[in-house]
Image (cartoon, rainbow, N blue to C red):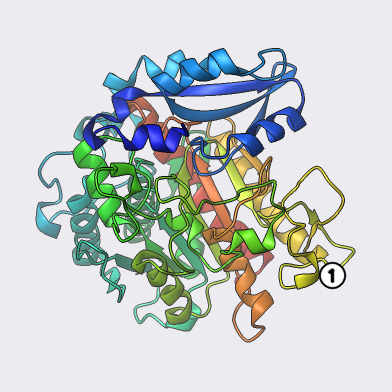
Amino acid sequence: MKVSTLLGLLPSAVLASDVLSVAFFAKERSQLLDFISTNHDIDYGCRPVVMPAGGEHKLHAVVSEEHYHRLKRSIDADVVRVETLDHINKRQAATAPIGKGDRFKGGKVAPRGLGSRKSSEYAELQSAGILNADEVYTAMRGLEKEYGLTLFEAPYKTFEGNTVIGGVANKAQKIKKNKQYIYFSSGIHARERGGPDNLIYFISDLLYANEHRTGLTYGNKTYTNSQVKKALGAGIVFTPMTNPDGVRHDQANSNLWRKNRNPASSTPGVPLSVGVDLNRNFDFMWNFTQYFNNTVSPASTNASSQAFYGTAPFSEPETQNMRWIYDEFPGIHWFIDIHSAAGTLLYSWGDDINQSHDPKQNLFNPEYDGKRGVVEDELYKEYIDQEDWDNISLQANATTAAMNAVGGREYIPQQAVGLYPTSGASDDYAFSRWHKNKNVTKVYGYTMEFGYPTNFYPTSEEYIQNIIDTNAGFMEFILTADEVGLKG
């Protein structure tokens, strides 16, 4: 029985206590690739990520306790072994709480981030807990009231009738939609707690520092007021909670909910068959059985899978809203989709290894259908212009260097394909738009994975550190974008 089926038989409210964070270890990367190919329905988080580990390689995942014991019995430990991550599993009861009530009083009080505070003041924010879903929006209304932040409503309502609200942060008094060059999105995977908070508090810091003519400090990284003004001058479009239905469900049930809440493809009595993985629903090689080698599964047609891709590209209102944002703000040139938990900054492409010498090997060439995605072979590698490759690599290196300099933990820049390919992802869709239609702005798309592998529910201390890490990363990302070029 596949893990997705097994978990689907469990009541949705008890899943978090019945799953374990684990790591698979192997001497060679290729051994982990082979393991994924035959166990692609295991929950590897946003995407499988391999990391060096003391002369070996490791791959993180979450599985049910029963499935863990079956894996221990069935896999050859001389090739791939599995171990529980006890340092994560033992502290689940100590995860940061979800905030109660409304600390922003319906928008009468504006949030204030960490970069504009002394470290001795962090305890106040830590004790208040993670923003609940309502507070994400009252925080934005508070910023609107205090600083005149421009808010907007995305046009497509979610299955449960929620509206996705976004903002535009810019030092200009009158917002010109074609002169906003940065786009940040978070909360697309509901269980990745703290993503909306990272973004809300960063925007709060920029607006506070601009208003009070101060700089910002994140751990060992300090930014001047002139850099704050430069960041705001870039024009920042942001949607802190892209998947409000999923976030509300996860916060109510603490069941590691990843998808949205659309039940159209679900099976009665199988809770995990509800919803679509929104980060497999974008129009980038969505029909993976056509584009990819049949030995890889970058998404899933199984509604109970954490990577279920939906019924069509952009079948979901949440992804339709993100597509609308690119049309509404046509100047966007730089994009980050904020996720947890791997400690990486990923850049395109995600379908196969990059190469810059053979432009015929590209995502639109049907000659290579069925050959993509096997990262260890030579049959296909995804074309990228060398200048684009240089730009996106420079940005990834600069951003992660700033996050590392903070002093919290190590962040690694790497190509999104990593060990295993993905399809229908937000970052690749953003980058592919220009390749399909030269009349739109070229967007360099990234996925930021904050925190520690499979630790989707951070402790209170980790929650604070995640804000510091990501906020330094956001700041560096914008400043580097300004250096490379804001306009596509």
Q: Is residue 330 above or below residue 95?
A: below
Name of the residue lying farthest toward the bottom:
439
Tell me which corner region of the image, top left, top right, bottom left or bottom right, holds residue 439.
Answer: bottom right
Q: Quadrant of the C terminus?
A: bottom right
In the image shown, does 240 or 250 lie closer to the viewer?
A: 250
Name of the residue lying farthest toward the right:
357
Write the residue at 30% across / 23% down.
Answer: 17
Disc 1: which residue = 359
Q: Is residue 432 above or below residue 260?
A: below
Please tell me whether mark 1 sits on a helix, a strand or a loop: loop
Q: Is residue 205 left or right of residue 313?
A: left
In the image shown, does 125 or 327 lie closer to the viewer?
A: 327
Q: Is residue 19 left or right of residue 221?
A: left
Tell me which corner region of the image, top left, top right, bottom left or bottom right, holds residue 208.
Answer: bottom left
Amino acid type assigned to the residue bearing label 1 in the image: Pro
x and y, in percent, of residue 238 in the image: 39, 63
x and y, in percent, of residue 443 in the image: 60, 69
Tell me which corner region of the image, top left, top right, bottom left or bottom right, holds residue 107.
Answer: bottom left
Write the residue at 72% across / 19% down.
Answer: 56
